[in-house]
Image (cartoon, grey):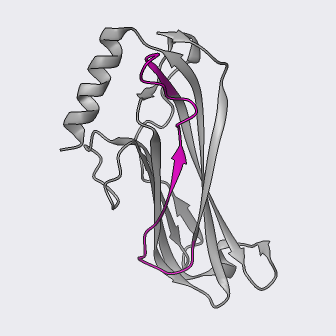
Amino acid sequence: MAAKTSVFYLTERVRLTTGATEVSDTIDLGAYVDVADRQGILVHGVDFIVQPYDDTAGAVTSFTGAINGDATFYSQLTDLNRGAIVLADDRALIASADLLLDDSNNATSNSDIYPDNFGPTSAMGGRIVINDQMYFRSKVLGTFIANNSAYVTVRVKCSVITLSQKDFMAIALQSTAADN
C-alpha cells in the first residue's frame, strides 16, 4: 500500500428529532475511490459527536435541556447499506458509538468498545474502504423536550491509498462476501 494523500477529514451530520427513529445519510467516496487505479480510502479513526439542540433558540443546548429523562444514542458507520443499525460482528461495520444518559443520576457513559482508532498512520493501521460510499446511521432511544432535537456528526480521519492488485482483489472479495 502506498499513501497518495496526507490525512484529511470527511464529515457528515444527521438530525434526530424523534425517539426510536433511525436517520441516515451517506458520505460520497466517488472522488477518492478508483477501481482502475486500485485506489481506496484508508480510515485511520472515526469520531462521533452528539450535540443537543434548542430549535427555538437555534443553538446548541445541554442534554438536560433537550432530553426528557434517560436516553441512549446509537451511531454507526458502514461501507455497505444495511438499512438499519447492525450487530458488532457485521463485516460492513467501520465504526460505532453508544452514548447513555442517566438523567436521575446526572451521569453519562460510553458503552461502545469497538476500536474506532485503527492505529498509527505510519504503520498504515486502518480500515480500507473501496466502496463508493460510506453509510452513517444514528438513532436515539429517548424523548426530546418540545422544540428540541440533537445533531450527530461523524468525523472520519482518512487518506487515499493505492493498493497492490492482490490487496485490492482481497478487499473486493471480502466486501462482496459481506454484501450477502
Q: Is residue 136 left or right of residue 84?
A: right
Could you tell me which residue is drawn at 42 percent across and 53 percent down? Answer: 111
- Which of the two residues, 140 or 156, is positioned nearer the viewer here? 156
Where residue 174 appears, as percent x and y from the top left, is 25, 29
Q: Is residue 175 above or below residue 37?
A: below
- Residue furthest bottom in the image: 146
Residue 106 within the segment the image draws in magenta: no
Where residue 159 appears, as percent x and y from the top left, is 59, 24
First to last magenta residue range: 16-42
Where on the picture, by quarter, is residue 163?
Answer: top left
Could you tell me which residue is drawn at 35 percent across and 59 percent down? Answer: 85
Q: Is residue 86 above or below residue 130?
A: below
- Which of the two residues, 73 or 147, is positioned nearer the viewer here? 147
Q: Is residue 43 above or below residue 146?
A: above
Q: Is residue 1 above or below residue 62?
A: above
Q: Is residue 122 left or right of residue 113?
A: right
